[in-house]
């Protein structure tokens, strides 16, 4: 999710194919960061095999509540790094649904605005701080233009229902994701984001030439529209973005070294470790309240 901006829609449509300004998805911000707070499986040995196993048994509502709790304290966490927010303004977070590695999880969408004086380094630091604290193997950031260092041009393909009844919801998003995996026979390179607040389902595509994911999504849209008895008319709209994944393999780098390299020496490692420890203790408290720890 990020790089999803809030901007006026600019749309050029030819039959069912549209090109829209990325700003529409990003929602009038410069960039959008999409991340999870459920630790990645590769961090299980670090946080504890039993703790990770117990976390996996939590319900969807538990994960959603955890994500809401962490997003609500985000500003307080980042205020401990005042230099970070000199050129970055945080927008309002939203809880979204995301597909990654074949699984659907709860994610957080964070829009950010960037001052003209920013060199883009603050974005990499911010994204890496989130990945480090929450033991993520990667965090996605999307920008509407070239604010982000080392970003890669990509496309966002967004699925919209222009019919009489809105087909796209949390359940159909999972179905569409499963259908995309079935079409490609792989899950590693396909992810999705469903934002209930914007009524939006989208996928990220780095294949600018063949646009393979767009073609698959169009087939799915056509098939679902044809069999619908409720006036569903799904279309695919595409927009250009700049995308980057900040990553760390916690099995190979259990101290989060790759994140720390991007965070830089200007930010206190002591504070980072304190926030990481606070998060793990919060996970234990949630499990304790659920009678699982």
Image: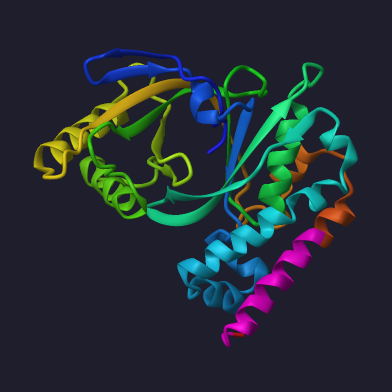
Q: How many marks on residues?
A: 0
Look at the magenta stretch and give its main secondary structure.
helix
Q: Residue at x 41, y 41 (%)?
A: 199
Split into 4 quadrants, where in the image is the C terminus?
Answer: bottom right
Residue 122 on image: x %, y % = 77, 31
Q: In the rendered structure, does residue 277 fall within the stretch colored magenta?
A: yes
Furthest residue in direction bottom, as rendered: 291
Residue 11 on image: x %, y % = 39, 15
- Tell me which corner region of the image, top left, top right, bottom left or bottom right, holds residue 186: top left
Q: Is residue 118 above or below residue 221?
A: above
Residue 289 on image: x %, y % = 63, 83
Q: Which residues are magenta?
A: 275-292
Query: In this view of the protein, which residue sits in the foreground, 156 or 226?
Result: 226
Q: On the rendered structure, is 120 left or right of 49?
A: right
Q: Residue at x 16, y 33 (%)?
A: 222
Q: Residue at x 58, y 88 (%)?
A: 291
- Tell me which corner region of the image, top left, top right, bottom left or bottom right, holds residue 273: bottom right
- Tell me which corner region of the image, top left, top right, bottom left or bottom right, holds residue 120: top right
Q: Is residue 89 above or below residue 7?
A: below
Query: In this view of the protein, which residue sits in the foreground, 170 or 186?
Result: 170
Q: In the rendered structure, does residue 179 fall within the stretch colored magenta?
A: no
Q: Is residue 247 above or below residue 6?
A: below
Residue 170 on image: x %, y % = 37, 53
Q: Is residue 232 visible?
A: yes
């Amino acid at each position: 999710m990020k790089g999803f901006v809030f901007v006026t829609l600019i749309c050029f449509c030819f039959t069912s194919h549209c090109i829209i300004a990325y700003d529409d998805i990003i929602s009038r911000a410069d960039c959008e960061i999409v991340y999870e707070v459920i630790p990645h499986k590769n961090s299980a040995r670090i946080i504890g095999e039993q703790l990770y196993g117990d976390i996996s048994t939590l319900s969807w509502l538990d994960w959603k509540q955890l994500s809401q709790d962490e997003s609500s304290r985000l500003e307080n966490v980042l205020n401990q790094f005042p230099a970070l927010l000199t050129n970055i303004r945080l927008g309002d977070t939203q809880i979204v649904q995301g597909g990654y590695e074949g699984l659907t999880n709860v994610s957080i969408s964070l829009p950010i605005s960037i001052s003209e004086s920013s060199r883009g380094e603050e974005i990499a630091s911010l994204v890496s701080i989130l990945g480090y604290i929450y033991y993520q193997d990667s965090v996605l950031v999307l920008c509407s233009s070239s604010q982000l260092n080392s970003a890669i041009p990509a496309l966002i393909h967004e699925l919209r229902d222009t019919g009489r009844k809105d087909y796209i919801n949390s359940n159909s998003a999972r179905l569409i994701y499963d259908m995309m995996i079935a079409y490609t026979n792989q899950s590693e390179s396909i992810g999705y984001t469903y934002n209930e607040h914007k009524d939006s389902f989208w996928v990220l595509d780095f294949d600018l030439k063949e646009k393979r994911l767009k073609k698959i999504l169009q087939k799915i849209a056509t098939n679902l529209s044809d069999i619908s008895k409720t006036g569903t008319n799904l279309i695919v709209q595409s927009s250009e973005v700049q995308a980057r994944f900040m990553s760390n393999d916690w099995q190979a780098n259990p101290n989060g070294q790759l994140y720390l390299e991007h965070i830089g020496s200007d930010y206190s490692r002591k504070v980072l470790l304190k926030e990481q420890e606070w998060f793990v203790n919060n996970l234990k408290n949630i499990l304790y309240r659920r009678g699982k720890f």
